[in-house]
Every structure is written in C-alpha cells, then in structure tokens.
Image: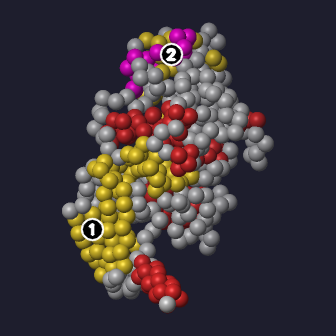
Amino acid sequence: MNSIKYLLVLLLATLTLTTLAQIKLPKVIGSNMVLQRNQPVPIWGWASPGKMVKITFGNQSKTTKANNAGYWKITLTALAANSKPQELLITSDTSTLKLSNILVGEVWLCSGQSNMEYTMKLMKGYTKPAKGIDSTELELAVTNPTIRLFKVEKKLSLPDVTTNGWHESGGEALEQISAAGYYFAKNLQAKLQVPIGIISSSWGGSRIEPWTPPSGYAALPAFAEEAAHDTLKIDGVIPGSMYKSMIEPLAPFALHGFLWYQGESNCMMNEPGMRYADKMQALVDSWRKQWGNAKMPFYSVLIAPYYYTKRKDKVPHTTETLPLFWEQQVQSARIPFTDFITVTDLVDDLPNIHPSYKWEVGRRLALVALAKDYGFKATTYSGPVYQRMQVKNNQVILTFANAAGLKTADQHSPAFFTIAGADGQFVDADAKISGNTIILSSPAVSKPTTARFAWTEIARPNLVNEAGLPAVPFRTNGLEWEYKK
C-alpha cells in the first residue's frame, strides 16, 4: 500500500512539473521585480503552441494565443506607481505561474565596463576616499524593499541572460550590484518616493563594440566601408557578442532609460577624430530601436583622470589622449535625449583606473534624470560648460553655461587653464573669475588665439558652480561632431 501511495505521489509530481513547464518566461520577468509605471508593460514568454495565455495583474486581465512556435506576448495598460506588493498570475491550459512581491515604479538599465560593474562590496585593497564619507558599509547593513536589483552575469549565455533574478535591495544581492547604479536608484527613490528597479549588465575591460549589434554599425555612413565586407569588423572586433547575450534578451521589458559608464578600453586605442562619438550613436540608436522608443533617455559618465601615459599598450599615449577622448564623449551628447556627467574631481589616486566616490557618480546621474525626466526643472545637473571666447586687451574671456555661482572648490585660483598664440605653444594662464566668465592672461602670450581647460590626463581642476559640480574639459578650437539621422 505504501509503495502504491509513493507511486501516486511521484506520478502527481511528474504531472505538475509537466503542466508547469508549459509556461516559460524570460529570466528578466519574475517575482520581486519592478514594472515600469506610466507606459505599456509587455509580458512575454512561451507556452504550448496554439494555447491561450491569460495574465491577471491588479484590475487588469488579458489573454492571447501562443503562436506556432509557442511564443506569446501580452501588453498591460500603463500602470500607476505602487509600493504595495502585488501578484501577477499567468495561466495557460492547466498550467499556472504566480509571481509575487511585484512593485510598480521606475526601471533603468545600467551598463558599461568595470567602473559601472564596480560593486557595492568593497574591493580588495580599497582605501577610504580623501573627500566626503563613503556610506557603503552602512548601506550594506540595511534592506530597502522599494529598491529592486537585477544583475546580469558576465556570460555569453544565449538565448537568455544568466542571472539569479530580482531581489530586494540588501544582503548578497546588494553586495554584487553596481555601486553607481545603486546610488542612482537611492537618490531617485528619495526624490520620487516610488519603487526603483535597477538592471545591471556590465563587463570589466569591455570595449563599446561588443555592446552594439552589427546592424547598429551597418546603419551609419561612418561605418560604410566596414559594412561592405562579408564579415563586419569594427577596429578588429566583430561587434555584438555582449549585446546579443546581455542586452537583447532584456527587451522588450519596459524601461525608463539607460545609464552608461564605459570608455577606458576605447580610450586606450587612441581613436582618431570622432570615431567614438560615431560608435556611441551606433550603440544608442540600436538600443533604442530594440526597445521601440527613439526617445529613451541615455545618460553617461565622462571617464575619470588616469595615467594613460604609464600604460604599456600597443598604441602610444600622450597626456592629451584622455582629453581628446573626453571631447568625443562630450560631442556625442548631441545625440537627442542624451547627456553626461563629469567626474574629474572624484579621483584621489591617478594610477587607479577605478576611483571610488561611486556614491557621487550615482547622485550626479540622478540629478540629470531628475531635471530632464521627472520635472525637477530647477535642479542643477551639470557643471560649467564652455560657450564662447572673446579676446580683448591681450586677455581671453571665456563664457560658460551652468555657471551660476562660479567659484573654485578650494578657494584658490582656477587651475588647469592654458592659452596659446598663433604659434600654438600653450602655456599656463593666470585665471580669474568674473561673474560667469573666466579671464585668462599670460605675459608669455601677447596675442592669445586659443584656450584650453583640463587638457591633460592628470587634470583634476577646481572650477565649479554653486552646486559644486565641476566644469567640463574643453578646448576652444576643438573638433565638432554631427548627429547623423
């Protein structure tokens, strides 16, 4: 009798597994997730071909039929923010999946290389920053149920991402998440008072090309020569491997926007002209196309000062390798609905390509989003940005935007300004603040024609506005880039 009961239990368990297996979801959809508010929310997956699938969430109930391949997608009507945990029920035939602890709020995807991957768990050899207070240890000691975390592991795991799913912010999940992404979420949540979901998908040391599908390059005139070959390679790399495994499977999960912290590996290539700006357009355009929204916000970070000249790379570097790369990053902000933050002041140790202060990186990215996406119009989100130059009485007069309360962070004279005459020989300039302008002069240059600011890899300048945000590096005769529609 006992053996018969055992066989019956085993049979029932097998039948349960069989019926449940009729519904499969992409790994980005699961319990503990945050659904994006105020826009249609796609839920998709696979079931037995031809079977009806029903989704129930809140007061919505919708059905569809799986196609011949078993794929189905149902789009929920736009949802209001909700911090109260809810259940999402998916049924097909005799199968039922119940996803619990679902919130509705804002969802952002964070990507890039190691400075975005840099986790909340402090790295080996970590040294405390010279400025401010690193609250990481305090953050790791608490749980925040209104911030949810989803980490994509560094694996080329087609056709779906490798992950352990969504988690409330706390414990091991928080230890392993992007620090910049977490602090972005924390600052956003504090202002918006709605749940925040962060998807972290980064890979240390990666160039931009693996994050971009081949179609992104083939669509742009800048890469027409490469696209003409049977095998598309961009500067020696076949693009798209990380995109295919770590970005594409996340779509069409509803997002508000993207955060991007990458560039060091491309800077090491000493890319000429506006090559990286073109690559940024290929990346941004293709990601937006994948999500079906040409206006999705895309905010990035100008990479930090670092001793590139001390590296033993295949290509040589000068002290201007980094500022030339900054120029490309700044120019790429001409892509509509993009912007960037500057972090030249967040470096204590120039030989360290992984500066701390990730809490401030996240805060500054949040300032951009708050000002440009969430109606906080009075929020200052950028440091001073060069606008124009005048030459008067052997002096250079520089005018800036975002320059209210122009000052220096250390009460010393503005540093890292240089000027040159027609001979192109730059010398250190005496710099004085006058309103929202900087006046430059040098006894060595009687007829200045050009000025530069922070035009060296070691530049950690002191010029800030009243919000304490650092001025953006520039040269008055810099290259310009045009967004190609």
Q: Which residues are magenta?
A: 397-414
Q: Nearer the viewer, residue 419 or 379?
A: 379
Residue topped by disc 1 = 56
Dividing the picture into quadrants, the one containing residue 92 is: bottom left
Q: Which mark is residue 269?
A: none
The residue sitting at 32% across, 68% down in the picture is 89
Q: Is residue 169 shown to the viewer in this render?
A: yes
The residue sitting at 33% across, 71% down in the picture is 90
Q: Quadrant of the C terminus?
A: bottom left
Residue topped by disc 2 = 408
Dividing the picture into quadrants, the one containing residue 446 is: top right
The residue sitting at 54% across, 23% down in the picture is 132
Q: Residues within 10 Å of mark 1 (few under 14, many from 20)?
A: some
In the image, what residue type sits under mark 2?
A: Thr
In the image, what residue type sits under mark 1?
A: Thr
Q: Is residue 477 above or below residue 408?
A: below
Q: Nearer the viewer, residue 332 or 478?
A: 332
Does the magenta portion include 53?
no
Does the magenta portion include 400?
yes
Gap between marks 2 and 1, in whole Å? 56 Å
Q: Residues within 10 Å of mark 2 (few under 14, many from 20)?
A: some
- Magenta stretch secondary structure, dominant: loop
Q: Secondary structure at mark 1?
A: strand
